[in-house]
Image: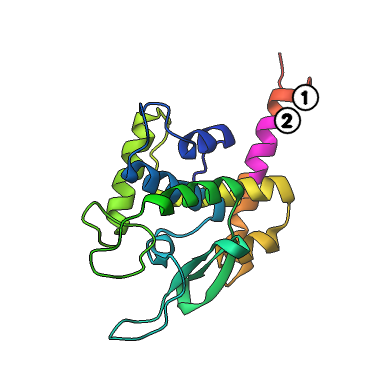
């Protein structure tokens, strides 16, 4: 079973870091934009690191964009498993974080349109993203082993808890089969069972 963060822990993880003092550095703004987008849109780590700032067609030896940000439409276009492209909404908090990052994003060292950059100015790698998220989670005292897929699980679980719309969650996650998404109904039941245990006067035998 995938492990999802509680709503409070997920929000605390992606919100502006309280342990950082003074004005945010570009790397901090990049991190916040990445973490917000992971939770906002439920992206796979490979989908997030493949994003460009805008769509780029194939030219001068470069391949066309696999994914890109569309701020005007409040969405990202990504290429998932099986080379299937999909559009996913981006929430307001993620848009704010992305706007702050884009305002300070330096040009990529290789001239690419990569949305998220390493300290060397190259497209950020999944491994660097994993390390940054883990370090941030530890600094934020999140009581879980946090990696990018945890935010994807949390996104799916929390949207399903609020909406109950399994098909919509399937589309946003890019699952080809509803069976892959149905695992989150078990997570949702766990949430309901916890609420029941805490709230119903006859839930527990005294």
Residue range of the region highlighted in magenta in the rendering = 188-195
Examine the rendered structure and indicate whether residue 140 appears above or below residue 2. above
**Relative to the observer, which residue lies in front, 40 or 72?**
72
Residue sitting farthest toward the right = 201
Q: Are marks 1 and 2 in contact (CB under 8 Å)?
A: yes
- Residue occupying the point 60% across, 63% down: 72
Considering the whole magenta stretch, tell me its main secondary structure.
Answer: helix
Q: Label 2: few (<14), some or many (≥20) within 10 Å?
A: some
Q: Residue furthest left?
A: 120
Dot 1 falls on a residue whose secondary structure is loop
Q: Secondary structure beneath disc 2?
A: helix
Q: Is residue 136 in view?
A: yes
Q: Position of residue 126 (x, y in %)?
A: 32, 57
Q: Label 1: which residue?
A: 200
Viewer-side residue, 29 vs 163: 29
Q: Is residue 2 visible?
A: no
Residue 4 in picture, x, y percent from top left: 52, 43
On-image quarter of the C terminus: top right
Residue 125 pos. (x, y %): 29, 59
Q: Residue at x 43, y 65 (%)?
A: 53
How crowded pointer 1 is (Cα within 10 Å; few <14, some 14-19, many 20+) is rated as few
């Amino acid at each position: 079973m995938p492990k999802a963060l509680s709503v409070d822990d997920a929000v605390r993880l992606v919100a502006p870091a309280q342990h950082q003092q003074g004005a945010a550095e570009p790397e901090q703004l990049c991190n916040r934009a990445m973490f917000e987008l992971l939770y906002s849109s439920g992206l796979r780590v490979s989908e997030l690191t493949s994003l460009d700032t805008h769509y780029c067609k194939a030219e001068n030896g470069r391949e066309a964009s696999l994914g890109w940000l569309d701020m005007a439409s409040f969405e990202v276009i990504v290429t998932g498993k099986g080379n299937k492209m999909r559009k996913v909404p981006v929430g307001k908090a993620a848009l704010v974080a992305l706007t702050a990052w884009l305002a300070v994003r330096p040009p990529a060292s290789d001239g690419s349109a990569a949305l998220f950059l390493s300290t060397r100015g190259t497209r950020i790698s999944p491994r660097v993203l994993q390390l940054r998220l883990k370090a941030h989670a530890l600094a934020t005292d999140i009581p879980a082993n946090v990696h990018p897929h945890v935010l994807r699980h949390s996104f799916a679980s929390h949207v399903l808890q609020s909406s109950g719309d399994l098909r919509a969650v399937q589309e946003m996650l890019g699952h080809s089969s509803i069976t892959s998404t149905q695992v989150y109904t078990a997570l949702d039941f766990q949430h309901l069972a916890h609420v029941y245990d805490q709230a119903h006067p006859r839930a527990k035998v005294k």
